[in-house]
Image: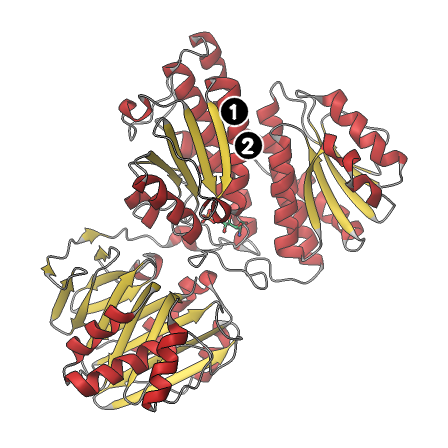
């Protein structure tokens, strides 16, 4: 969580920092701040709330000439979203920005307070700057003081520090939170992801955990955890930012829903053979000796994993278990080496998921990541990776990442089915034909969007929503409910249809909204009976199906299809748009819903 930027150069530093923060605002937007050092003078600005407030505060500030600066957009962990808690945090002569959590900050704070340091904020971050200044007093040299500071920090961090004692230098360290360095001519940048650097830099250095060092006008000095000098590895940065714009849609989420057909085409590209799936990135050795797949993820990625578990058992005939990463970390799990450990993540940075990957690796398991961000921490950590190719996803509510994860999983289940001979070539070829049609199932038709827009006005109240479905439509129901609660702030739950009568049906009344997923190609009659039970108890029913259903109060008709997975993808779009339109009617910020952040890099 949180986004950090840094800059050294002669060009419009304020604009560079603010634009960089704009690209990272999805990571947190409780408050933001920048600190700029020119010769011996610091200029510091902070504002609570969205970045716009910081832009307004700095509109009469026009620094010129060589300067260094750092910036931060915050998602609060320790301390409320106030100006005092906003980064950069100040010492006597230094400023720091930080992404992550300093776990031992309480004990460090007590010690520093006893030494006479005065704390202004409730954050864990502030200890870093005082600790640095405490060491600087004793050691006299800023680099030594910075290293002594790092030696005392426990937890996860990406840190940038500037100080009057080295006025042309930015000190940095990465340990568990993302950060990279960008080089563009004689300008140098830092950012939490590569997006802010596109157009400004030609090359980037992806920092690894434990790496640290400093940047000045004419030096890039990089060290490993033991402070031994290492050579930076420069990688070229793509030059197009176009895909990150809104393209005329009202919200990034809306644009991303409409993009799904295109990105799924990209996901499929080069991977569909006649009767086999090609994953060039996978070594077939990966599956040798594997008897179980364990899928581990958070949020939406967890929902795609849950849906995938049905496909792996059904098509690949391999045992498959699914874990919520934050639970798995601490359950002292049994990990046997005949298990392939698969993590799923849009960002590749989610702290809980990343930690489970490290645990599995430590236990000697083979690992695979299904991820949307190349070069992300998980991609670098896992033995193998499959990229989902969804492009940059900016809406906090994940849409196209989920869609592409599902397509990858469907393909992977067939890839394994071939290896394990659990399906015939003819069956696999049939599925490949079905896969080719997926992009057309998610094209948003104007009439459908308009219908959902009108319908949304009837779902702005009530005491709760139950999204129900069976089989893969149960994880889809979970995902529908998550989408709705994230951006509408209405209470919604996903439930297996057949489980309602074991408790939740007690809630049924006209103010309980049931969103029923009723595919005609999978357990239709079973699901129908469950929905009828709810209808008989007066719950308001909104049914989504290709087949008319007379007990529905509202009915959203999808196309008659020949396979349940096509129904799955079409219903997915219906659920995404329904949530979007409910959120719009409620006047919420669709792309930046309250209390959330796009990338959750704290546990
Ligand atoms: C999705 O709409 C959410 N905002 C969230 O649940 C997300 O899926 C989760 O935090 C996991 O993120 P990841 O896929 O980047 O690991």
Q: Residue at x 49, y 55 (%)?
A: 246
The residue tagged 2 is: 307
Q: Quadrant of the C terminus?
A: bottom left
Dividing the picture into quadrants, the one containing residue 123 is bottom left
Task: Indicate whether 414 appears above or below 266.
Answer: above
Circle 2 residues within 10 Å: few <14, some 14–19, many ≥20: many
Q: Secondary structure at mark 1?
A: helix
Circle 1 residues within 10 Å: few <14, some 14–19, many ≥20: many
Q: Which mark is residue 371?
A: none
Residue nearest the viewer, comparing 120 with 248:
120
Q: Report whether 486 appears left or right of 191.
A: right
Q: Quadrant of the N terminus?
A: bottom left
Task: Indicate whether 258 appears above or below 434.
Answer: below
Task: Give the Cα distance between marks 1 and 2.
Answer: 7 Å
Q: Report whether 551 appears left or right of 575.
A: right
Work out whether residue 556 can be spotted. no
Q: Position of residue 30 (x, y in %)?
A: 51, 71
Residue nearest the viewer, comparing 405 with 92:
92
Q: Residue at x 41, y 33 (%)?
A: 267
Residue nearest the viewer, comparing 254 with 597:
597
Q: Residue at x 68, y 51 (%)?
A: 581
Q: Secondary structure at mark 2?
A: helix
Dividing the picture into quadrants, the one containing residue 124 is bottom left
Q: Are marks 1 and 2 in contact (CB under 8 Å)?
A: yes
Q: Which mark is residue 311?
A: 1
Q: Is mark 2 within 8 Å of ligand 1?
A: no
Residue nearest the viewer, comparing 513 with 150:
150
């Amino acid at each position: 969580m949180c986004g950090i930027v840094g800059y050294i150069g002669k060009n419009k530093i304020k604009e560079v920092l603010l634009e960089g923060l704009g690209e990272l605002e999805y990571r947190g937007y409780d408050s933001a701040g920048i600190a700029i050092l020119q010769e011996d003078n610091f200029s510091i600005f902070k504002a609570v709330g969205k970045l716009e407030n910081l832009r307004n505060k700095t509109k009469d500030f026009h620094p010129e000439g060589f300067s260094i600066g750092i910036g931060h957009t915050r998602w609060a962990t320790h301390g409320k979203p106030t100006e005092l808690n906003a980064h950069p945090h100040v010492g006597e002569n230094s400023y720091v920005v930080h992404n992550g959590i300093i776990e031992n900050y309480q004990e460090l704070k007590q010690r520093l307070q006893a030494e006479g340091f005065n704390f202004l904020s409730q954050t864990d971050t502030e200890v870093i700057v005082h600790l640095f200044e405490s060491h600087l007093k004793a050691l006299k040299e800023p680099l030594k003081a910075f290293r002594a500071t790092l030696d005392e920090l426990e937890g996860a961090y990406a840190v940038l520090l500037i100080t009057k004692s080295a006025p042309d230098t930015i000190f940095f360290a990465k340990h568990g939170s993302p950060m990279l360095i960008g080089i563009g001519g004689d300008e140098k940048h830092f950012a939490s992801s590569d997006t802010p650097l596109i157009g400004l830099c030609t090359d980037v250095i992806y920092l690894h955990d434990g790496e640290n060092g400093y940047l000045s006008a004419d030096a890039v000095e990089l060290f490993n955890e033991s402070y031994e000098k290492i050579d930076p590895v420069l990688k070229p940065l793509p030059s197009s930012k176009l895909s990150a714009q809104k393209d005329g849609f009202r919200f990034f989420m809306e644009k991303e829903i409409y993009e799904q057909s295109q990105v799924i085409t990209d996901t499929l590209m080069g991977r569909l053979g006649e009767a086999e799936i090609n994953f060039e990135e996978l070594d077939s050795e990966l599956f040798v000796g594997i008897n179980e797949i364990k899928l581990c993820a958070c949020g939406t990625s967890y929902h795609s994993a849950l849906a995938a578990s049905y496909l792996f058992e059904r098509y690949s005939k391999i045992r498959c278990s699914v874990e919520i990463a934050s639970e798995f970390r601490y359950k002292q799990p049994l990990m046997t080496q005949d298990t392939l450990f698969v993590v799923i993540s849009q960002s590749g940075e989610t702290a809980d998921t990343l930690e489970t990957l490290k645990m599995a690796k430590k236990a000697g398991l083979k690992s695979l990541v299904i991820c949307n961000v190349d070069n992300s921490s998980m991609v670098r950590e896992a033995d193998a990776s499959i990229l989902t190719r969804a492009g940059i996803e900016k809406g906090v509510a994940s849409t196209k990442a989920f869609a592409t994860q599902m397509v990858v999983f469907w393909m992977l289940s067939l890839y394994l089915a071939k290896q394990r001979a659990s399906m015939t070539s003819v069956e696999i070829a049939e599925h490949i034909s079905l896969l080719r049609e997926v992009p057309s199932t998610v094209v948003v038709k104007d009439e459908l969007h308009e219908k959902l827009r009108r319908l949304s006005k009837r779902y702005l109240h009530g005491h709760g929503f139950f999204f129900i479905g069976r089989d893969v439509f149960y994880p889809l129901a979970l995902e529908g409910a998550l989408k709705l609660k994230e951006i509408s702030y209405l209470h919604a739950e996903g439930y297996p249809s057949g489980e309602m009568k074991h408790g939740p049906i007690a809630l049924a009344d006209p103010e309980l909204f049931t969103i029923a997923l009723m595919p005609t190609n999978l357990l239709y009659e079973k699901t129908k009976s469950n929905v009828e039970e709810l209808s008989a108890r007066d719950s308001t029913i909104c049914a989504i199906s290709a087949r008319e259903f007379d007990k529905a109060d509202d009915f959203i008709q999808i196309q008659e299809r020949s396979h349940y997975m096509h129904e799955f993808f079409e219903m997915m779009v219906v659920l995404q748009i329904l949530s979007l339109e409910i959120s719009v009617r409620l006047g919420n910020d669709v792309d930046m819903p309250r209390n959330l952040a796009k990338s959750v890099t704290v546990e």
